[in-house]
Image (cartoon, rainbow, N blue to C red):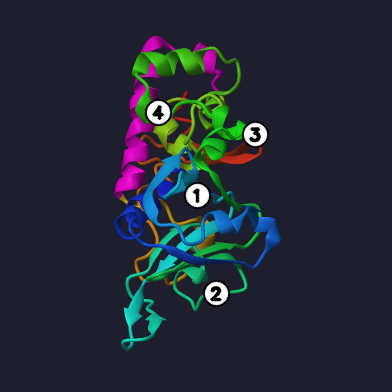
């Protein structure tokens, strides 16, 4: 599932190309993937691109928003247009902007069998692809989207709170600390990859109950969460394990080259402390840790 750094990366990229463009037409290829009335967005100019936790928001003129939730396998691909003549434009694979779950659709011909919604712009095309049909696109007023129940229930992002506030939020729970970090109603934006790596950085066992950490550990964990998220954004997010062997022509993220524990089962701990990275299931998610340094 794309996490905060992956969504923030595509937001930053789309914010450079979408503002000022108009949505000429929206083509819905899969009704399950679309909510709202497309007519609210057609003909509207893009004002900006925002993000709330893992939801991308495209602001349109007239206080209309397009909300996009990637879920497990959602992705966005913006394909710029080049002028073929004075009358026609043709798509260009060069200069594509991609984000979300990496697959061959990042570089293949679009639309593909996974394309669910197409945004035809006055210059270029934006595709929403989703293999497993868990993600969605919603068009509605800015007020109604930002007051959706699940968005209202989101906790603050790590970037928006202090270390003291972080400690108050997580220390009230008796659940394993990794599950608390990933609970979007407590703190939003931290997914499985970055929770694993942040806990390694702070030398905290993922199974440790959140209310049993010592004062200094809360401080170190807060710093570690911020650190791995910022690093994830800097490297453009992570390319999922099942896309390692896809030739993405540099379009995928590179955080996976800096994994501390995630997807490193059986490998030596980077601290060279003699530990071997173990994997187990916690809350239904693959969890990685070093039994030597994470106690």
Q: Residue 139, percent across and down?
A: 56, 50
Q: Which residue is mark 3?
A: 283
**Marks 2 and 1, how far apart in space?**
21 Å
Residues drawn in magenta: 208-234
Sequence-wise, the earlier of marks 1 and 3 is 1
134 to 142, vertically: above or below: below
Q: Quadrant of residue 226?
A: top left
Looking at the image, which residue is at 40% across and 15% down?
165
Q: Nearer the viewer, residue 11 or 175?
A: 11
Sequence-wise, the earlier of marks 2 and 3 is 2
Residue 92 within the magenta-colored segment of the rendering: no
Sequence-wise, the earlier of marks 3 and 4 is 4
Q: Which residue is mark 1?
A: 2
Sequence-wise, the earlier of marks 4 and 1 is 1
Q: Which residue is mark 4?
A: 158
Q: Residue 212, percent across and down?
A: 51, 12
Q: Residue 264, percent across and down?
A: 47, 48
Q: Nearer the viewer, mark 2 or mark 1?
A: 2
Q: Secondary structure at mark 2?
A: loop
Q: Secondary structure at mark 4?
A: helix
**Marks 4 and 2, how far apart in space?**
36 Å
**Marks 3 and 4, how far apart in space?**
21 Å
Q: Secondary structure at mark 3?
A: loop
């Amino acid at each position: 599932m794309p996490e905060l750094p992956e969504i923030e990366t595509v937001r930053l990229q789309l914010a450079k190309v979408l503002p000022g463009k108009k949505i000429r037409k929206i083509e819905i290829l899969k009704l399950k993937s679309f909510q709202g009335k497309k007519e609210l967005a057609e003909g509207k100019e893009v004002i900006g691109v925002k993000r709330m936790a893992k939801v991308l928001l495209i602001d349109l003129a007239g206080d209309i928003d397009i909300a996009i939730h990637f879920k497990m396998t959602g992705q966005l691909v913006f394909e710029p247009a080049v002028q073929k003549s004075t009358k026609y434009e043709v798509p260009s694979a060069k200069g594509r902007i991609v984000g979300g779950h990496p697959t061959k659709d990042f570089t293949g011909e679009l639309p593909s069998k996974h394309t669910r919604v197409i945004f035809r712009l006055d210059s270029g095309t934006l595709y929403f692809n989703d293999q497993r049909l868990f993600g969605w696109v919603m068009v509605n007023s800015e007020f109604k989207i930002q007051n959706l129940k699940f968005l209202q229930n989101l906790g603050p992002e790590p970037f928006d709170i202090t270390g003291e506030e972080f400690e108050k939020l997580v220390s009230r729970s008796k659940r394993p600390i990794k599950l608390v970090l990933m609970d979007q109603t407590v703190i939003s934006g931290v997914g499985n990859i970055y929770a694993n790596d942040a806990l390694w950085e702070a030398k905290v066992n993922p199974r440790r109950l959140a209310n049993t950490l010592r004062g200094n550990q809360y401080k170190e964990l807060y710093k570690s969460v911020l650190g791995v998220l910022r690093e994830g954004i800097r490297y453009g997010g992570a390319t999922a394990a099942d896309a390692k062997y896809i030739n993405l022509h540099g379009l995928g993220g590179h955080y996976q080259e800096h994994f501390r524990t995630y997807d490193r089962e059986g490998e030596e701990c980077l601290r060279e402390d003699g530990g071997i990275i173990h994997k187990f299931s916690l809350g239904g998610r693959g969890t990685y840790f070093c039994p030597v340094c994470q106690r």
